[in-house]
């Protein structure tokens, strides 16, 4: 039985109307920092999240007359940078270091940044905010 294409996302085959679920490519970075206090290290982590579409498709009937054809994909989360900053480093110096990291390729302008501010004093939070703003 031949295929009749209705549009780019649906087609008819084997007596069913199928909807294509295309894999959406993703290539993004996420940066997180857990700022240490006077007796703790500060941790900085960069994760690269990738979704790569494959050539194979997996059919899943979803009703008597319908189905979904999902494009296979690989998804990875890779830690590409992990660092402990020295104990006792000032929040201003930590913020400057994180700012420099965020300004380097491939992170510059294309990453999310999250900071764990549990127990962080107000001055440390403000230092990171103002320094991060300068990185972009």
Image (cartoon, helix red, strand yellow):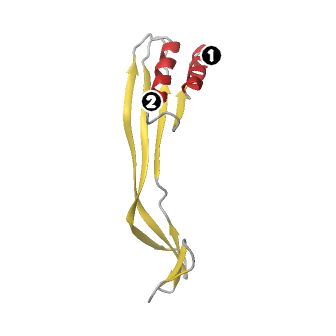
Image height of 20 relative to 130, above or below: below
Residue 20 position, x and y percent, is: 51, 70
Residue 112 position, x and y percent, is: 53, 36
**Circle 2 sits on which residue?**
104
Count how many numbered circles sit on residues in the image. 2
Q: Are marks 2 and 1 in contact (CB under 8 Å)?
A: no
Marks 2/1: CA distance? 27 Å
Relative to 58, is 129 on the left or the right?
right
Relative to 73, is 61 on the left or the right?
right
Where disc 1 sits, the SS reads: helix
Tell me the quadrant of the picture where the C terminus can be found. top right
- The residue at 39%/14% (across/down) is 86
- Asked whether residue 36 appears in the rendered view, the answer is no
Front residue of this view, candidates 130 and 18 = 130
Residue 69 position, x and y percent, is: 47, 71
**Circle 1 sits on which residue?**
122
Among numbered discs 2 and 1, the one appearing first in the sequence: 2
How packed is label 1: few (under 14 Cα within 10 Å), some, or many (20 or more)? few
- The residue at 48%/25% (across/down) is 34
- The residue at 44%/27% (across/down) is 44
């Amino acid at each position: 039985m031949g295929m009749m294409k209705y549009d780019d996302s649906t087609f008819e085959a084997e007596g069913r109307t199928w909807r294509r679920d295309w894999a959406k490519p993703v290539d993004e970075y996420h940066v997180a920092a857990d700022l240490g206090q006077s007796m703790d290290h500060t941790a900085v982590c960069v994760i690269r999240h990738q979704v790569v579409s494959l050539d194979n498709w997996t059919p899943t009937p979803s009703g008597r007359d319908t189905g979904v054809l999902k494009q296979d994909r690989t998804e990875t989360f890779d830690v590409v940078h992990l660092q402990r900053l020295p104990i006792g480093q000032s929040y201003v110096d930590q913020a400057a270091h994180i700012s420099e990291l965020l300004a380097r390729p491939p992170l510059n302008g294309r990453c999310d940044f999250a900071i764990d501010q549990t127990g962080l004093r107000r001055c440390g939070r403000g230092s990171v905010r103002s320094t991060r703003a300068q990185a972009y």
